[in-house]
Image (tube, rainbow, N blue to C red):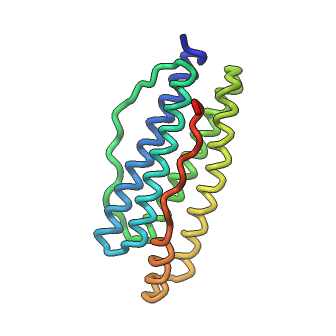
Amino acid sequence: MSRLSSVMAQAINEQINNELFASYSYLAMSAYCEHELFTGCAQWMRAQSQEEYTHAMKLYDFMIARGARVRLAPITEPQAEFESVPSVFTIAYAQEQGVTGQIERLYELAFEEKAFAALVELEWFIKEQVEEEKTARDIVHKFTLVDGDPSSLLDLDRELGARTTAAKPTAAAE
């Protein structure tokens, strides 16, 4: 028997899909950067894709721990063509802002539904989104500062390529 209302379970299932779309979107951004020979940016986007997948699995594990059914939905095709590598990061920043809104609405629903375990679980996501938005905003700012300067772009690409894959967050069931 599920320890979540059907409304809450459906909303979390939708967020799992949102996180998987974000992962898929970042992977498409990575492919674009690879094609443009910005391998550092591609590595950063690929690591971000893996991180978003981990977020989906964190919600998946929470649903399992609460006895709820996970229902996966089709993932929309992500954008594959971009104006430039800097524009990819501008779009990534906007995507993070969108995810923040999704998480905030989910938190609000959990509050209304008195889904206290979900509230605790979602607090991690709220903190994570503050970090995600700041990171994306900082990178967009750096691209603005270099303003197309080739040597600065190469340095920024190298800097972004130094990112390693994020550690797996603790699952709810652990």
Residue 27 placement: quadrant? bottom left
In this rendering, the answer to whether 24 lies above or below 37 is: above
In this rendering, the answer to whether 131 lies above or below 142 is: above
**In front of the other: 125 or 138:** 125
* Residue farthest along the front direction in this orientation: 174
Which quarter of the image is occupied by the C terminus? top right
Apparent side of residue 113 relative to residue 98 in the rendered image (left or right): right
Query: Whole-percent x and y of residue 85?
Result: 40, 70
Q: Count how many numbered circles sit on residues in the image.
A: 0
Query: Whole-percent x and y of residue 121?
Result: 64, 34
* Residue drawn at the location 65% of the way across and 42% of the way down: 124
Query: Whole-percent x and y of residue 149?
Result: 46, 87
Which quarter of the image is occupied by the N terminus? top right
In this rendering, the answer to whether 103 lies above or below 159 is: above
Apparent side of residue 63 relative to residue 37 in the rendered image (left or right): right
Query: Whole-percent x and y of residue 86?
Result: 45, 71
* Residue drawn at the location 35% of the way across and 41% of the way down: 76
In this rendering, the answer to whether 37 lies above or below 130 is: below
* Residue drawn at the location 50% of the way across and 52% of the way down: 95
**In front of the other: 40 or 169:** 169
**In front of the other: 56 or 73:** 56
* Residue farthest along the top direction in this orientation: 1
Residue 117 placement: quadrant? top right
